[in-house]
Image: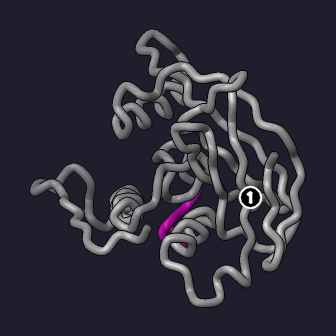
Amino acid sequence: MPILKSTLILNKDLSAQPVWSEAFFMTLTHEMGHTLGLQHTLTSSVMSTEITRAMSKASPLGDDDRAGVSALYPTPDFATRFGSISGRVTAGSAGMNLASVVALTLDGTAISALTNPDGTYRIEGLPPGNYATMFFLRAPYNPGSTNAMSNQTAQFCRQCHGDKSNEMNGSTAGTVFSTSPTSRAKLQ
């Protein structure tokens, strides 16, 4: 559902980061993404962590960002131009909440979605083509770990989702899907 009204609040003291800096611009773009309704992602788009972000002022939005905004605020021809992949991430019969599921093309396009509490997901805004899917489960925050990347991702998710970022394991079926504007690929 699109957001009809939102507010972005910035700190009163912006002296810690010059407002002309790359970091300030990317942080502001990331937070504006939240005001539009975008979730965090692990695809190196503007909605990922500062450490994993591959975007810049010159190219601030990734394929995942554009697909997310397009799915939330579609043009009249959106459904005829883009496909989707849906499925469920499970551990045994239990659905895995907040796993990141990514659809990848051979050229490196990555578009993702987070799973719902029951493990279901739907990745929308996929241009026609073939996709492989993979999923990532957040590791729990471990203050004693020397793996800064794992802790950064876990801490990032804990800040936004509280203590729900506990240990997760899981599996998903299927690997390669074809999407077209008129047919929807579905993960079984």
Residue 55 locus on image (x, y percent): 55, 61
Apparent side of residue 128 relative to residue 156 in the rendered image (left or right): right
Q: Does the magenta stretch include residue 3?
A: no
Q: Give the residue at x 41% y 63%.
A: 37
Which residue, as the protein is rendered here, is positioned at the far left? 12
Apparent side of residue 175 relative to residue 126 in the rendered image (left or right): right
Mark 1 sits on what residue?
85
Q: Does 16 appear above or below 93?
A: below
Residue 156 locus on image (x, y percent): 42, 36
Question: What is the image's colouring?
Answer: one colour
- Image quadrant where residue 30 sits: bottom left
Q: Does 54 appear above or below 72?
A: above
Q: Does 122 appear above or below 170?
A: below
Residue 78 locus on image (x, y percent): 64, 82
Apparent side of residue 51 relative to residue 4 in the rendered image (left or right): right
Q: Give the residue at x 49% y 77%.
A: 73
- Image quadrant where residue 76 sits: bottom right
Circle 1 — which element?
strand
Return the residue nearer the eye: 67 or 26: 67
Q: What stretch is highlighted in magenta?
A: 54-60
Which residue, as the protein is rendered here, is positioned at the far front? 93
Which residue, as the protein is rendered here, is positioned at the far bottom? 76
- Image quadrant where residue 139 sits: top right
- Using a 10 Å C-alpha cutoff, classify the residue at mark 1 as few (fewer than 14 neighbours), some (14 to 19) or many (20 or more): many
Q: Is residue 57 magenta?
A: yes
Q: Give the residue at x 84% y 51%.
A: 132
Q: Does 147 appear above or below 72?
A: above
Residue 123 locus on image (x, y percent): 66, 58
What is the chief secondary structure element of the magenta stretch?
loop
**Type of residue at label 1?**
Ile
Q: Give the residue at x 34% y 31%.
A: 162
Return the residue nearer the eye: 53 or 187: 187
